[in-house]
Image (spheres, rainbow, N blue to C red):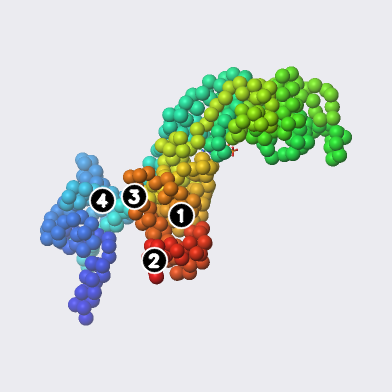
Amino acid sequence: MDEDLNQYWKTVVNTIQDGIMIVTPDGKIVSVNEGLVSMTGYARDELIGASCTILGCSSCELARGIPECHWCVMFKKGELRKQQCALMRKDGSRVPVVKNASVLKDRDGEIIGAVETMTDISDLVDKEQQLETFRREISREDSFHGIVGRAANMQQVFDFIDGVAQIDSPVIIYGESGTGKELVAKAIHEAGPRRDKPFIKVNCAALNESLLESELFGHVKGAYTGAHKDRMGRFESAGDGDIFLDEIGDLPASTQVKLLRVLEEKVIERVGDHKSIPVQARILTATNRDLPDLIARNLFRQDLYYRINVIPIRIPPLRERREDIPLLASSFFLRMQLKSGKKVQGISREAMDLLLRHPWPGNVRELRSAFEYAFVACKTDMIEPRDLPTELMSEAVVCAPADVGARSLDEIKRERLVQALREANGNQSEAARILGISRTSVWSQMKRYKVGL
Ligand SMILES: Nc1ncnc2c1ncn2[C@@H]1O[C@H](COP(=O)(O)OP(=O)(O)OP(=O)(O)O)[C@@H](O)[C@H]1O
């Protein structure tokens, strides 16, 4: 029976993936399991009889470097718990491990050796390194008042902001939706002498004409039905700070006239009142519309255009600064990791490839949303292509550079399909839901990729 048990234990010890070894009190290896052999690349015979220093353990070497230290900390203390260190493989490469060890004593309490276990933590370290890289990337000088960007055309925007922040002239920020116009407006405020004064934002597209006027200029009691008391407008609230008029291209015609007067005379009147109130705020505006085109179509006043278009800043769309995609991705990844509390550790290479290929019509906002989506969809510890919004997958084919063959994309799509079907236990409607496509598309993809048919 004892012999049987002994045999079972051998099997158990050799089945365990961790490395296990037994050493004598002077550090000679007397027994090792299969796990240690495959972890270190040494043959069993090379290890048995050798000194444990053959494993080149980083923490042991460190301890031995201290003059009055015992040759082995573990033998001195009697045990070792969760010691993180690196072993040297036979081929000279390093493998990060967590070590645990205990001395073995005979019946008389005499130390006769020690048993040591080593868990390979390479995967964990790889992921931690990716996170660390993300952190380092973001903390570098690649962000300006929260605007992430390393591309030359963004660095020019940052330089320009620094300059215009110091002067009082009206600034207009042009850029497609989601390029960060509001962030730029805030940066202008924060980089200039008005930083401790108010920053007031008004979205000119969000309100109808009369509400907008009352919002901008305020009103007096009884100015219109529902005006129960005097109300200060946003120009007054901005005081000597900055007022940011977003979507200025959508300003209704009558409000355009009133705003023009404010800019010319530097005074406002509350709705229903004739008292002039001086305006001290600097005016920042932004639009994603083509103002000259609106002027040509009589939808925007040319005189107002000249007043607000004093210092124009153009923010490039994301497709014109593709080199910033990894940086922005890292930034949103870290933000989402913090916000969601999920233990997602990184972005797979395939997922990053898709991010790099997508044309991003919704610009940085779309990229941010892609990460919000991915953190909900991700069920493992890495963001994979299947976790990204479906548009990234479909447009990837259209935007794939010539040197990226359709095959690799097909492979990714196939993998995504298989994964979704697996998660859905083969249910095609559920797989369609996971992928965000129709059930017929799932069926035709199954046919195309010869999956489960
Ligand atoms: N360069 C950037 N770095 C970090 N975050 C950014 C950057 N650009 C945009 N964002 C983020 O993307 C989102 C959209 O940005 P923002 O609202 O400033 O865009 P916008 O150009 O004003 O859009 P819209 O024209 O639709 O109002 C915000 O969450 C913003 O924080």
Residue mark closest to the camera, 3 vs 4 = 3
Dot 3 or dot 1: first in sequence order is 1
Dot 3 or dot 4: first in sequence order is 4
Amino acid type at image mark 4: Val
Q: Is residue 341 above or below residue 255?
A: below
Q: Is residue 123 above or below residue 267?
A: below
Across the whole image, how many numbered discs are drawn on residues?
Answer: 4
User: Disc 2 marks which residue?
Assistant: 451
Residue 214 placement: quadrant: top right
Dot 2 or dot 4: first in sequence order is 4
For mark 1, give the secondary structure. Answer: helix
In the rendered structure, the answer to whether residue 164 lies left or right of residue 131 reads right
Q: How far separated are the C-alphas under marks 3 and 1?
A: 22 Å
Q: Position of residue 182 (x, y in %)?
A: 59, 34
Residue visible at 24% across and 43% down in the picture: 62
Amino acid type at image mark 3: Gly
User: Disc 3 marks which residue?
Assistant: 405
Picture quarter with the C terminus? bottom left
